[in-house]
Image (cartoon, rainbow, N blue to C red):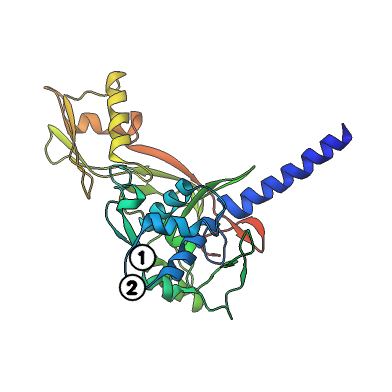
Amino acid sequence: MAFVKNLFDKNFIEYASYVIRDRAIPDLEDGLKPVQRRILHTLFEMDDGRFQKVANVVGRVMKYHPHGDASIGGALVVLANKGIFIERQGNFGNPFTGDGASAPRYIECRIRPLAKEFLVTNPKVTHYVPNYDGRSQEPEVYRAKIPVALIIGAEGIAVGMSTKILPYNIREVLEAEKHALRGESFQIYPDVPTGGLIDVSGYNDGNGKIITRAVFDTSDEKKIIITELPVDSTSDSLLNSIENAYKAGKIKISSIDDYTTDHCQIEIKLPRGVYAKDVVDSLYAYTDCEKSISCQMLVIRDNMPQVMTATAI
């Protein structure tokens, strides 16, 4: 039994270390998880100025990433939808509605000039190592000129730990870098493309809890229009939570319609005798129009997981 226990302990530690370092947690140096780094490395290799089919890119990435094509394709779509390093062509899904992307054979992508500017690919600066079968070379980590982890954010669950980094506005991050280089103090807070309000009173420089709310237009007292989504929400998930609250008798509405396209527009009509001011608090209390998100800036630093702050990153 002692042999089995030692074998189990050794294998579990190796597995846990692999998941933490090589799957779920981004590296401090370039802010990327291994699959994201391998996607960008492949796009750098394939770059000829033209769009490449995502299916072809995924196939090439499999030379470096020893996992399924579905996970690579999903990671590529998520990274492309950040709008920073990858330029898209075709239906990459809709972050407002939650609709998924088209099949990889129907969509195309290419590397953005911004990636070439901010990620150093020069082998004299970036260290390259053999891939999993020793046939090719891949970057161990890129040397990045900007704190990528803040700009694209990250979310991952490893063994015994997890990371949740909300994205920040790239312009605000660059301004914060200037302040840091001058030795000046600064404050920076998350900024997501779907909008929404956030309460950062429980948020401590990248760690802690934020309260996020949808934005309502109540200019018509018989109608509520949701114009911005809470963080980490889609119009579909928000619609479902409102319908569930209505069925449970928590809120009074007469109808709800979703007109969301490239911006949020959910229209809630109210029954006779009920006005917008009477329903707003109930929407925040009983639906996903308000929710709490716990954040933890866990990154890999010097091959070890470490919780850091936005200022330190």
Q: Which mark is residue 58?
A: none
Please name the residue shown 61% across and 58% down the image. Answer: 300
Q: Quadrant of the C terminus?
A: bottom right
Type of residue at label 2? Answer: Gly
What crowding class fits label 2: few (fewer than 14 Cα within 10 Å), some (14-19), or many (20 or more)? few
Question: Which x, y percent locates residue 219?
Answer: 13, 41
Res. 259 image quadrant: top left
Pick the residue in front: 69 or 264: 69
Please name the residue shown 63% across and 43% down the image. Answer: 159
**Dot 1: element:** strand
Type of residue at label 1? Answer: Arg
Q: How far is mark 1 from mark 2, CA to CA? A: 7 Å
Find disc 2 in the rendering and name its residue. Answer: 49
Let me know if residue 60 appears in the view.
yes
Pick the residue in front: 12 or 244: 12
What crowding class fits label 1: few (fewer than 14 Cα within 10 Å), some (14-19), or many (20 or more)? many
Find disc 1 in the rendering and name its residue. Answer: 110
Circles 1 and 2 in contact, beta carbons < 8 Å: yes
Let me know if residue 188 appears in the view.
no
